[in-house]
Amino acid sequence: MGDTKIQWTSYTWNPVTGCTKVSPGCANCYAERLANTRLKRYYPQGFHKITLHPGRLDQPFEFKKSREIFVNSMSDLFHQQVPDRFILQVFETIKNCSQHNFQVLTKRAERMQRFMSRMWVDGGVPMLNGNSFSLDGEESTHKGWDNLWLGVSVESQDFIHRVDHLRETPASIRFLSCEPLLGPLNLNLEGIDWVIVGGESGPKYRSINLDWARSIRDQCKAAGVRFFFKQVGGKTSKAGGRLLDGVEWNEKPNLF
């Protein structure tokens, strides 16, 4: 767990590491690039090996001051190889660290919706009492916790269905990460609180058309949704800067 240069969050927490590609947005994955270069010593079996780190589950308790924490910047919590029980342990930490806002971002929107719809939290998380819990019982609804933000990555119109799954998923804040933005998006922003947009960075970056970003900004304005423009992108994350039409867009949902 540590500081990050990701502009829309403060810290990263990785109780799971490793991932596999599911769509074109993954082609030049920054996490895979880091795992194969600067962080290679931490990935002896390669980035595609999904690894659980139970020893990291208590890390958020070390910080008393409120922080925004991006969960699994180096993985996807809802990857099919992450067991239900371990996801529940991650959520137990989130529930018990109410001083922080936890941002969970996934490309596995279907699994997230199914999983969250089977949790029930109005009276706590009784599934976590010893071995008595089960996710195979009767479905029930829940309101989500105030400090749990759930988001999906949407890089092009081909993956707009992820937004539909997110909309049906209970969460305090629902957000979209349209990064790397690979095409224009026509969004239904009902039930969405925040949209992050950014171009790709790295040696094989695919250029963003800023008209795509302008269109999303205008859709957010019309819907009353917060808009955050992360970067234009280029060979480095700072190459194109962060301005869109001369403005640095840093809108976020209300915190804490």
Image (tube, rainbow, N blue to C red):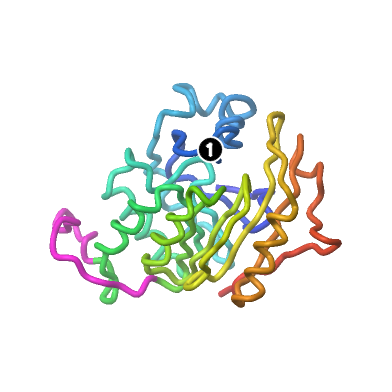
Classify 24 as above or below 256.
above
Depth check, front residue: 82 or 1: 82
Q: Main secondary structure of the magenta part?
A: loop
Q: Residues within 10 Å of mark 1 (few under 14, many from 20)?
A: some
Give the x, y percent position of residue 87.
Answer: 33, 51
Classify 217 as above or below 153.
below
Which image quadrant is residue 206 in?
A: top right
Give the x, y percent position of residue 9.
Answer: 62, 58
Q: Which residue: 64% across, 28% down? A: 38
Q: Which residue: 61% across, 36% down? A: 30
Is residue 249 one of those drawn in magenta? no
Classify 204 as above or below 139.
above
Give the x, y percent position of residue 118.
Answer: 24, 62
54 relative position to 23: left or right: left
Is residue 128 one of those drawn in magenta? yes
Residue bearing mark 1: 24
Which image quadrant is residue 223 in?
A: bottom right
Q: Which residue: 38% across, 39% down? A: 52
Depth check, front residue: 48 or 157: 157
Which residues, given as a range, are shown in magenta? 126-144
Q: Mark 1 falls on what kind of element?
A: helix
Tag 1: residue type?
A: Pro
